[in-house]
Image (spheres, rainbow, N blue to C red):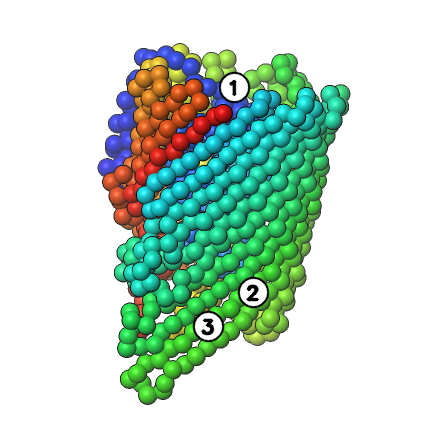
Amino acid sequence: MTSHILKYSISLGFLLFQALVFTETIDEIVVNGDWRQEEINKKNSSLIVFSEEDINKKQYKHFEDLTYAVPNLNFAASDSRPRYFQIRGIGERSGYEGTPNSSVGFLIDNIDFSGQGGIASSYDVDQVEIYRGPQGSRMGANALAGMVYIKTKDPEESFQITADLTVGDYGRKDIGTIINVPVNSEFKYRLSLKKTDFDGFRNNTFLKRSDTSKKDERSYRFKAKWDLSEDSFVDLVYFNHDFNDPADIWTVDGSLNTLSDRPGMDSQDSDALGMTYYLQTPISNFQILYSETDTDVIFSYDADWGNSDSHDPYIYDYFSETLRNRESSNLELRFLSNDLAPNPEGNFEWIFGASLFKIDESNKKYDDGAYGDPFDGYGIYYSESFFSNDFFSESKSLFGNINYFFNENIKLSVGMRWEDWKASYLDSNQESFNPSDNMNGGKISLTKTTDDDLTIYISSAKGYKQGGFNLGTGLSKSSYSNDINYQPESLINYEVGINKYLSSSSTYLDLVFFFSDRRDQQVLISTQVDPQDPNTFLFLTRNASEGVNYGGEMSLKTELSNNFSIFIDLGLLKTEINNYASRPDLEGREQAHAPSYSFSSGFRWNITEYLEFLFDVTGKSDFYYSDSHDNQSDDYVLTNINVSYMSDKLRYNFWVKNIFDEYYSLRGFYFGNEAPNFENTLYERHGDPRNLGLSIQYEF
């Protein structure tokens, strides 16, 4: 860690020196994920933004690719695409138990996909915004740690057809097309289609196949804008993401060569519909937002990770499959005051509204297995089991925010959200629960903006997350019933931020320092009931009395000349679990999936008017894999390059990811999965090896 910090301190000093010498103009960035659009240099929270240009030039094909470039953002990779994210060390690492309880909000065009981010294709995306820190007043219980906001491209005024083709190693063949049609002055629509197809990065040596972890993904999106009058319009979006991805990832030796005889699936098929009505009145802007989703997930895996040859002379063969359906709907009403610019002094901006959010989820889990030891004289033991559950929740919320301008440079902002959450649960073990919580969160901040493009803010924000219950334990009628329920968690986050735009030196510098106090921190641990059966894991969530997360984030972008620019993003994080009576061994230890540092840095060089070279490195420190054991990952650094050539209508982009073929780990399990002794062993899930390709885009 010391060597990394030293290198980046030297780099930062160099960049700050260069920023005082060169002049150019940095494009203005407007953020969309808050109640109102706002320039990024006037924000009052820790935020990192990726524009359409960033996404296309660096060939981020999926939100997963982009996460490596965001300090203090991590994800828990298990099988195919990641669904579970951690911001500043806070967030779920799995969803085996089935009931939605996210800590990181995930919105695509204002449609809630928290806990389902695996379908986040970055094709035809306008902007991605990652909000670090609780968004209790903006989003509620799903955003204890922060929020990801993805805005796809809206219909435009001109007719456009774009075709995209990507070819690469590992059998990669991606195709896509975008059609934008302005039907008339009142109605326009945009259609985008994308198909991703490549073999994946594993080789199944037993089945002699290279496609048992392939990506077979199709995306379809339709967006329309209808101007009803001068004062009102309707936005419509419908999309389907069908990610039919096999999952054959885990190995006993940590290699990229799998041995499974029954490879699993990690597929997600999501339909979503969103409609927003806008009405401008003389005193306010009235908005109605409605959305609904329907998602089918198949999550299955070869639990023994092997075959008859690899386990010989023992019989060890287990498989698990979960079929999940989740339907959600959200209705939200918002009233926003009109903008006060250019004379806000002594005036208020306000917003208030209400929302009704529902989730209906069902799970069906099928397990089978066989175990036999030829030396114990008992023969082969066969097992089959079926488990199902139904979960329904309803959240009613009232929210509001008031901005008071002491003058045009000083703003006090106060936001609040009150949420009434109720749920019901029933499963095939005859366990039933009907939990409910009344929760509240909010944020207060003071922001000062000077005439020389310096913004300073201080804020205090409260996030929250509902309580719940542990599933499938069979304990609801036993003397251990008090261990089934766990309480809501809350988080108080204190933050100080400084951002400065140096127009004379074409530099943007953003510094944020934060301290988060977690109350009744929810800690997930797992235990294996039968060491010879890998399908008998139980996942238990309990409350620790408290935890702390603190650190800082820095972002610096500077254009050293007309043709050369540099960026550096750095995150530092310290976490602790405190006062955990059930697990005193964890007290004072870092929280899981919370790297102490993470960074992204690189440069862009315009070699000629048409030719561009991009270079970037990303990295993370080591981190604990779980709260159930003390094993850690190794730190890693990944290096990527892009060479882009652009003419009037044609763009070529040659890219290489992980160019030095770094062997790094993203997830670790600690248990016994090798007959006959089943000794506890650390098994690691490794990230993608070096891969390269050529992307071609043509605008007709």
Amino acid type for the residue under numbered disc 2: Lys
Q: In which quadrant of the rendered view does residue 692 lie?
A: top left
Q: Residues within 10 Å of mark 2 (few under 14, many from 20)?
A: some
- The correct choice, above or below, for 373 with respect to 163 in the image is below
- The correct choice, above or below, for 407 with respect to 362 in the image is above
Residue 524: x and y, percent? Answer: 46, 58
Q: Are marks 3 and 1 in contact (CB under 8 Å)?
A: no
Residue 361: x and y, percent? Answer: 61, 57
Alpha-carbon distance for marks 2 and 1? 54 Å
Report helix, strand or loop for mark 3: strand
Residue 351: x and y, percent? Answer: 68, 31
Which residue is identified by label 1? Answer: 449
Which residue is identified by label 2? Answer: 364
Alpha-carbon distance for marks 3 and 1? 63 Å
Amino acid type for the residue under numbered disc 1: Thr
Alpha-carbon distance for marks 2 and 3? 14 Å
- The correct choice, above or below, for 215 with respect to 321 in the image is above
State the mark number for residue 686. Answer: none
Identify the residue shown where x is 57% and y is 24%: 159
Identify the residue shown where x is 35% and y is 80%: 372
Amino acid type for the residue under numbered disc 3: Asp
Q: Residue furthest front?
A: 700
Residue 228 visible in rendering: yes
Q: In which quadrant of the rendered view does residue 391 lie?
A: bottom right
Residue 196: x and y, percent? Answer: 44, 43
Report helix, strand or loop for mark 1: strand
Which residue is identified by label 3? Answer: 368
Q: Residues within 10 Å of mark 1 (few under 14, many from 20)?
A: many
The front one of 302 and 11 is: 302
Foreground disc of the pair 3, 1: 3
Report helix, strand or loop for mark 2: strand
The front one of 568 and 469 is: 568
